[in-house]
Image (tube, rainbow, N blue to C red):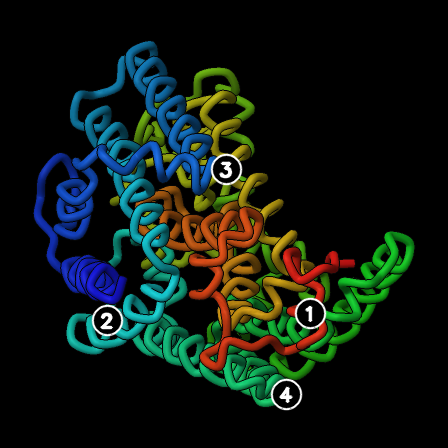
Amino acid sequence: MNLSRNKSNIKIVLYSLLSSVQMSFVGTLIMSEVYAGLNSLNFGRIKQLYRNNPDVKKVQRAMFIFLVIQVVSDVINDNSMNNMLRGWAAIGVSLVVFTFMFRMFDDTPKIILAFMCAEVVRLILFGSSNLEGDASSMMEDYSLFKFRIAPITNNIILLITFYTYNKRKDMLTVAIIMTYGLANVALDFRSNGMFFLFSGLIIHFRKVLMNMTLARKLGLTIFVVIFFQVLYMFYVNAVLSGEFGGKHAGDQLSEASNPYNPISLMGQGRGEFFVAIEAVKDAPWLGHGSWAVDEDNHYRSLMFKDLDKDKSRLLALNNSGVIPSHSILLGAWVYGGIIAAGCMFYIFFLTMKRGFSLMMDERAMETPYYPILVFFTIELLWIFPFSPLPHIRSTLPLTIAFILTIYHSLKNDEYDEEEDLLPDDGGYHDDSYYEARPGNGQSVS
């Protein structure tokens, strides 16, 4: 078992380190993806993988249907050969990396720790890849903290909280997460800060949320929305007065038509999302094809209709030449049509269903991976609607495979696998749970 775990750790570390090695082949091919493909050729264990985690087959089928529909869309739209191959390759590579990640986590979920350590080393030495971003967002949102420091510190914080939660230092875990979240907001990385802030709140109130009735949950949701709006108003005042946040946040709020309306701010910061909706309306059934060209800058001009036309951002968009979307869900719809979007919505729904189930599951709360599970689930809530489509081959495979593997490991109640999910001392945050486990003469209430 230890030898198998060591091999898995080595494989995931190599995957991480190879992520900084790129080559030009039908777009950009990352060597970690080649490595994942070579390690996914052994089909001997695939049946066992399907038994352990039935969701693997569901994700694979959804991605395969997405690929087939994208081929049909590109042919009907008479897309260029280069754009067709780039689109097909991205989906095919994503399918391969998904399979690789599911196999890695099926060995042991502890490889997430080795991966995060390797990511810290890789990002310090080589920096982050621009694959999941685009030129416009880099030009608009660039900051040293967001693109160089935060990818490193995110992994460090998750590693630290794994160990503090593992040692049952719950309050320290929450304090670290909340403090880091506030620091992100102050340093102009609002979305990342919100991921950590919401994660900290969920971890702190996990037992309360688990025992809440539906009516109370609805009431709490209304309260949170109102409370968030009040806090947001204080945040806007502080940023506009220069007391909090950075220059980028101040510029965005000052340019928004109504800075006190979060939707208005979202339109300012994620204008591509709303433009993608217009593109979907124009070709809802089969989309515009892979990497569809924005003819005559039609859709990009819509994005600037109510905004100041910052020259550097406009230049970056003109150079990209594609219909902007900056959304996995809408990007799939823009490129491949309604069925392609349905495939991504299905994966999104499946993952959120499993993720929220884990957040309310007492057994999941007792694993040292709980802070990571909560963060990944909250992060995916943003990534699917508001991050660019290339995330399907970078961010999604790791986070989704991790969530679904933990879910089925606990659901199957496989004791040999569950040992990997326990704290180092083999105990639980709440010892009464162990006493009530099936096989001990009692049932879990």
Amino acid at pointer 3? Ile
Distance of label 2 from label 3 (alpha carbons) = 27 Å
Distance of label 2 from label 1 (alpha carbons) = 38 Å
Amino acid at pointer 4? Met
Mark 4 lies on a secondary structure that is helix
Farthest residue to the front: give it: 441
Distance of label 4 from label 3 (alpha carbons) = 33 Å
Which callout, 2 or 1, points to the residue nearer the camera?
1
Which residue position holds label 2? 118
Task: Decide: few, some or many residues near mark 1? Use Cα within 10 Å; few <14, some 14-19, many ≥20.
Answer: some
Which residue position holds label 3? 347
Mark 3 lies on a secondary structure that is helix
Task: Decide: few, some or many residues near mark 4? Use Cα within 10 Å; few <14, some 14-19, many ≥20.
Answer: some
Q: Earlier in the sequence, mark 3 or mark 1?
A: 3
Amino acid at pointer 2? Ala
Q: Residue at x 48, y 45 (%)?
A: 272
Which residue position holds label 4? 171
Q: Earlier in the sequence, mark 2 or mark 4?
A: 2
Which residue position holds label 1? 435
Q: Earlier in the sequence, mark 2 or mark 1?
A: 2
Task: Decide: few, some or many residues near mark 3? Use Cα within 10 Å; few <14, some 14-19, many ≥20.
Answer: many
